[in-house]
Amino acid sequence: MDFWSILRGRRSVRAFRPDPISHVQIESLIEAAGWAPSPHGRQPWRFVVITTPEAKERLASAMGSEWRQQLALDGQDEATITARFQRSHARIVEAPALIIACLYLEELDRYPDPQRQAAETTMAIQSLGCAVQNILLTAHAQGFDAGWMCAPLFCQDRVRAALNLAETLHPHALIPLGYAARDPVRRPRRSLSELIVNWE
Ligand SMILES: Cc1cc2nc3c(=O)[nH]c(=O)nc-3n(C[C@H](O)[C@H](O)[C@H](O)COP(=O)(O)O)c2cc1C
């Protein structure tokens, strides 16, 4: 595939066939992540790989119980909460493999003022997005698929507890991996004239 086919062909996949993804395929994704740009070249991200049914279940249940509470807080009724929980739970446990992208801030620069410290953290988050995009594009280039779930960001403590992760790891994105069960519907893209707001 040429570069533009990879870029345009990547899609967020939310339902996978049960066919497994190999260790070698997963390692190639993490290697691709490592080539992303990052502040000071510090690579402020670490990755957790999950392939066993037990770990998937532990993670899905831990995140699901917090999500149920959050949906109740939003005023959603019990039937809707249960349906949404079941869909999300299935998405996690039925994916052949999962990667959790975590922010790791320990090796970044330290500033005496909160404003610059916040900018440093923002840079790290920006580069985590670059690392995840490398993962998504590499999966597509290699003929399989991936998605992006933001759920860990909303329940970082639960994810840490379920997977026994250090406090220094901040789970940000859950990336399910596998082969698409069907072609997903793509969202249309904005035109260039909408994206470029000024060009002098
Ligand atoms: C930061 C971020 C968070 C996202 N979170 C979710 C999510 O929680 N669930 C989901 O189904 N898709 C999620 N997505 C995927 C977007 O919905 C998807 O990228 C968008 O609809 C465009 O579709 P495409 O990726 O197929 O081009 C997320 C994407 C990003 C960049």
Image: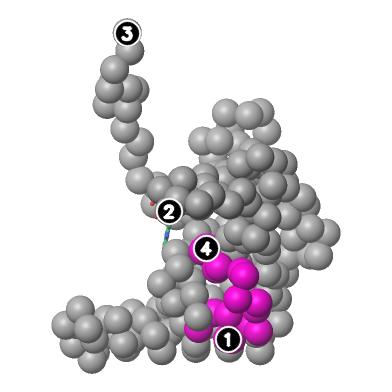
- Check disc 4: other Cα within 10 Å, few if <14, some if 14-19, many if 20+: many
Q: CA distance from mark 2 to mark 3?
A: 34 Å
Residue 113 included in the magenta stretch of the image? no
| C-alpha distance separating marks 4 and 2 | 25 Å
The answer to whether the residue labelled 3 contacts the one labelled 1, judged by CB atoms less than 8 Å apart, is no
User: What separation in Å lies between label 4 and label 1 (alpha carbons)?
Assistant: 16 Å
SS class, disc 3: loop
Residue 141 vertical placement versus 2 (above, below) = below
* First in sequence: mark 4 vs mark 3: 4
- Mark 1 lies on residue: 161
How much space separates mark 4 and mark 3, taking CA atoms?
Answer: 37 Å
Which labelled disc corresponds to residue 197?
none
Residue type at mark 3 is Glu
The tag earlier along the polypeptide, 3 or 1, is 1
Q: Which mark is residue 114?
A: 2
Q: Is mark 1 within 8 Å of ligand 1?
A: no
Name the residue rendered at 49%, 88% in the picture: 61
Disc 3 packing (10 Å; few <14; some 14–19; many ≥20): few
Q: Residues within 10 Å of mark 1 (few under 14, many from 20)?
A: some
Q: Earlier in the sequence, mark 2 or mark 3?
A: 2
Residue shown at 50%/83% (left/top)? 158
